Amino acid sequence: MKAQRMLRHGVILGTFCLGFGIVLAISDSITVDDIAARALEDRLNSLSEVIPASIHDNNLVTDAITMKNERDKEITVYRATKGGKVTGIAYEIFGSGYAGQMKLMMGLDTQGKILGVRVLAHKETAGLGDKMEVKKSDWILRFTDLSLGNPPPDKWKVKKDGGQFDQFTGATITPRGIIDAIRSGLELFAANKEQMMDIAADQAPMKEAH
Amino acid sequence: MTTPYKTIVRDGLWENNGVLAMLLGLCPAMAMTTSATNALGMGLATAVVMAASSMLVGMFRSRITQEVRIPVFILVIASMVTLVDLFMNAWMHELYKVLGMFIPLIVSNCLPLARLESFAGKNPTLPALVDGLFMGLGFTIALTLIGAVREIVGVGTLFADASLLFGPAFKFMEMRLLPTDTGILMMVLPPGGFLVLGLLVVAKRMLDVRAGKAIQMGGAHSAA
């Protein structure tokens, strides 16, 4: 009797698992293409904000290589080309904020001048640390056109630390993290310029390394 | 016997409010109430999941035996959360980008499970659906209240960025009540959340006492 009851419970639980499993599998197969399309759109949108459409005629998302950044983390480097010549690159940079890591996308021209920086993801306090989002404040736009020599390296800091950038009201740690991220992103470019802009080294050889 | 829908609605929204009376679901209630807009979004997403899972459990209640009910309930909630997550990501992507990070958190909320256990598992489909929906809406109201108080005192705004979350039509909700930089930072940090919740619980009890009712205790539920 006891074994029979256990079997019955097992069958009930199993049936529910199977039923919901099937429902989830069907929903996943219905939505998987749409979700992938949305993710691609998001990526293109964030890239188009840091690389002006006028300087490239290629598909930024597909024309990309992967490489290791200064912290040995794998990043994707997107290349903008026009008429077969590299006109700019964009890649993700990372900064530590008040509440964990912040992910940013930075676009540079071939001289290492910043075309644009945008925050992709962060966990900063809403209403305080989120003023680096372009939809909430234009703070992040001030980095456009700057480069590693402009301002000089020791001025790539918030004013509180003796640098030249304003912190925003109520938060110093967030802007400090972003400025550090941008500076080390620029240094990464300076050190790996050839590799990052080498158009001959297309996707394949880079992927073999992993 | 007619189903006492009026009582179910009253219980969900006020008398037995998930957060303010039963003190359930405190994890999202603390984490997601740094602004009224976030709180409202989290509340609505939870309400959808609660209504759907309560309805399903009400429907299948005769098939679910006592011994395996808890795993089945958890299965139902987790499946509903995953469905909402998938559908919103695919078809309501703008909203998903703002709410997306809250949705998996609904699984960690013990309020849906508590309602399945104490109500939906024992009642027919329709009352279960109504209970899930109004408990969810009560949760939304409580969260939005906490969020509003924290946002006003902490940052001086109310429903900031509501138009980003719900669309430009909701621009009218965005308000600045205090001048910039007058906020008390602590209120948007975790201690502020507990402080506001405590004060709101007191306020609710005081209102109940003034209304001459016996104070309804949360019962044997324990908060997780």
Image: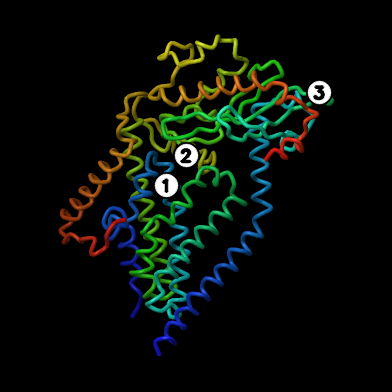
**Picture residue at 43% right of the left edge, 49% below the top:** B42
Q: Are marks 2 and 1 on the same chain?
A: yes
Residue with the mark numbered 1: B40
Q: CA distance from mark 2 to mark 1?
A: 9 Å
The chain to which mark 3 is attached is: A
Closest to the camera, between mark 2 and mark 3, is: 3
Residue with the mark numbered 2: B162
Q: How many marks?
A: 3
Q: CA distance from mark 1 to mark 3?
A: 49 Å
**Picture residue at 45% right of the left edge, 63% below the top:** B51
User: Does dot 1 land on a helix, a strand or a loop?
Assistant: helix
Disc 3 crowd rating (10 Å Cα; few below 14, some 14-19, many 20+) is few
User: Does dot 2 land on a helix, a strand or a loop?
Assistant: helix
Quarter occupied by residue B217 = bottom left
The quadrant of the picture occupied by the N terminus of chain B is bottom left
- Where is residue A61 shown, x and y percent of the image? 71, 37
The chain to which mark 1 is attached is: B
User: Does dot 3 land on a helix, a strand or a loop?
Assistant: strand
- Where is residue B87 shown, x and y percent of the image? 58, 55
Decide which of B107, B160 is in the foreground and name it: B107
Q: Are marks 2 and 1 in contact (CB under 8 Å)?
A: yes
B133 to A106, vertically: above or below: below
- Where is residue A105 shown, x and y percent of the image? 60, 30
Quarter occupied by residue B221 = bottom left
